[in-house]
């Protein structure tokens, strides 16, 4: 049997920030002149985002004393401060593990997979570092077998979920009994800073925090039936763009270099990359495209001659959550797993973009099943449980990640 994504679980921090609130916070920073204020208003209002989530409780209420994050990111006068990279990373260490575990538990519960069944762990992040790392913490926090094999993919940016799923697929292909837990967590808002730089302004208008986890296996008896079969993957480097999206570590957070060329490069290159990937196969039924920014989605839509509704799932995730770097494409795939309009046998093309510019692609096939039947629940009861889970996740919850979005807005 082909490796498949059995389930996807998501989680976001509890602090939800309305786009207008974030816009006004940045516009009211000291030293913002009239031109910068116009740039801030235009970037935030054009981002096609309604709200985002963050581990920084002060972004939701600047007057609030910091919560779990500890460090202040806004002073008593409402000014954004510039914590050191060490301080920002300390917040990651304090807050990220809980999101890793929450998303993982959601995926395991939905897949009907016990902790004892997990054989491999793959963690993904580009917004913080620590060791023993998130892969280690998941073993401890979820009560996994201490002999579980662990892998961490770091600093790959928005496209990193795809290599994570590809690694899980390769493991499942080589070991049919493997059950792989893949977890992406990105805390992009840790790296915010006040700046008149248009690139930084656009980045600030889109970045967000979130987590997503997937259970991947080729064992037909592991977890519930159905899911998304992982048919194949591809990686392509565009002919230009190496200097247009760059993610480095500075003294006051992770710093991005990006240019307005990013969406234009995507628009020029996407047709060739997808044609090589599909290699003459029929056009996929459904598209899951990482929403680096609204303009990136527009360029993909135009470059591939897609119908206006083809990227509705990507646009809705951008609207509801912003750009959560690597976790974002998993949010989109999770919606497709739950969407009955995506029929059994539908071919799904997933695309994500990273530094380089890199285009990561995956071709998947949806295999539908009755969730209620597979979990042994009455249909109505299961629907209520699923709804409660979604509501709880929403209530509960890079610069390259933001860079893709930033260049796209």
Image (tube, rainbow, N blue to C red):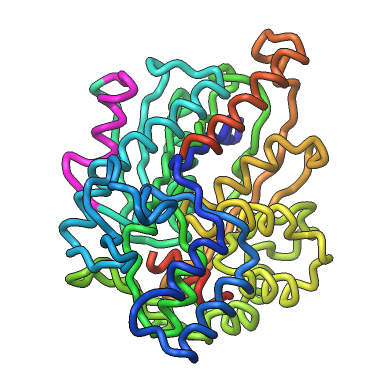
Q: Which residue is at a point 29% across and 37% down the rendered structure image? A: 135
Viewer-nearest residue: 116 or 261: 261
Total number of numbered labels?
0
Viewer-nearest residue: 59 or 311: 59
In reply to whether residue 130 is colored magenta, the answer given is yes
> In the image, is residue 206 above or below residue 114?
below
User: Where on the picture, by quarter, is residue 99?
Assistant: top left
Q: Position of residue 154 (x, y in %)?
A: 31, 55
Viewer-nearest residue: 239 or 102: 102
> In the image, is residue 292 above or below residue 98?
below
Q: Which residue is at a point 32% across and 70% down the rendered structure image? A: 193
Is 1 on the left or on the right of 208, as rendered?
right
In reply to whether residue 327 is colored magenta, the answer given is no
Quarter of the image with the C terminus is bottom right
Q: Which residue is at a point 50% across and 19% down the rendered structure image? A: 113
Q: Position of residue 170 (x, y in %)?
A: 45, 42
Provide the residue span drawn in magenta: 129-145
């Amino acid at each position: 049997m082909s490796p498949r994504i059995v389930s996807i679980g998501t989680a976001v921090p509890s602090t939800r920030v309305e786009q207008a609130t974030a816009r006004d916070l940045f516009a009211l920073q000291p030293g913002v002149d009239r031109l910068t204020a116009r740039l801030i208003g235009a970037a935030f209002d054009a981002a096609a985002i309604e709200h985002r989530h963050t581990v920084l409780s002060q972004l939701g209420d600047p007057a609030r004393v910091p919560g779990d994050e500890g460090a202040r990111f806004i002073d008593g006068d409402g000014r954004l401060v510039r914590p050191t990279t060490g301080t920002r990373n300390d917040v990651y260490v304090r807050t990220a593990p809980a999101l890793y575990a929450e998303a993982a538990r959601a995926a395991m519960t939905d897949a009907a997979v016990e902790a004892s069944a997990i054989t491999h762990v793959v963690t993904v992040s580009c917004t913080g570092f620590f060791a023993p790392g998130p892969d280690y913490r998941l073993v401890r926090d979820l009560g996994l077998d201490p002999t579980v094999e662990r892998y961490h993919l770091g600093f790959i940016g928005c496209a990193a979920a795809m290599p994570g799923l590809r690694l899980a697929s390769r493991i499942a292909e080589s070991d049919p009994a493997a059950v792989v837990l893949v977890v992406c967590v990105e805390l992009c808002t840790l790296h915010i800073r006040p700046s008149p730089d248009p690139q930084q302004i656009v980045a600030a208008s889109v970045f967000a925090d979130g987590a997503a986890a997937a259970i991947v296996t080729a064992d037909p008896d592991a977890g519930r039936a159905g899911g998304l079969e992982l048919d194949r993957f591809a990686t392509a480097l565009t002919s230009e763009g190496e200097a247009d999206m760059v993610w480095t570590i500075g003294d006051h957070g992770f710093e991005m270099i990006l240019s307005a060329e990013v969406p234009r490069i995507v628009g020029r290159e996407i047709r060739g990359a997808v044609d090589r990937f599909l290699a003459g196969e029929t056009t996929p039924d459904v598209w899951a495209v990482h929403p680096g920014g609204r303009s990136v989605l527009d360029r993909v839509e135009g470059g591939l001659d897609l119908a206006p509704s083809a990227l509705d799932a990507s646009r809705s995730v951008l609207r509801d959550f912003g750009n959560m770097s690597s976790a974002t494409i998993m949010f989109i795939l999770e919606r497709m797993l739950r969407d009955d309009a995506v029929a059994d046998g539908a071919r799904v093309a997933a695309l994500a973009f990273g530094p380089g510019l890199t285009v990561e692609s995956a071709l998947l096939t949806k295999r539908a099943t009755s969730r209620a039947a597979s979990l042994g629940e009455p249909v109505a009861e299961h629907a209520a449980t699923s709804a409660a889970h979604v509501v709880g996740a929403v209530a509960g919850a890079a610069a390259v990640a933001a860079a893709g979005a930033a260049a796209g807005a």
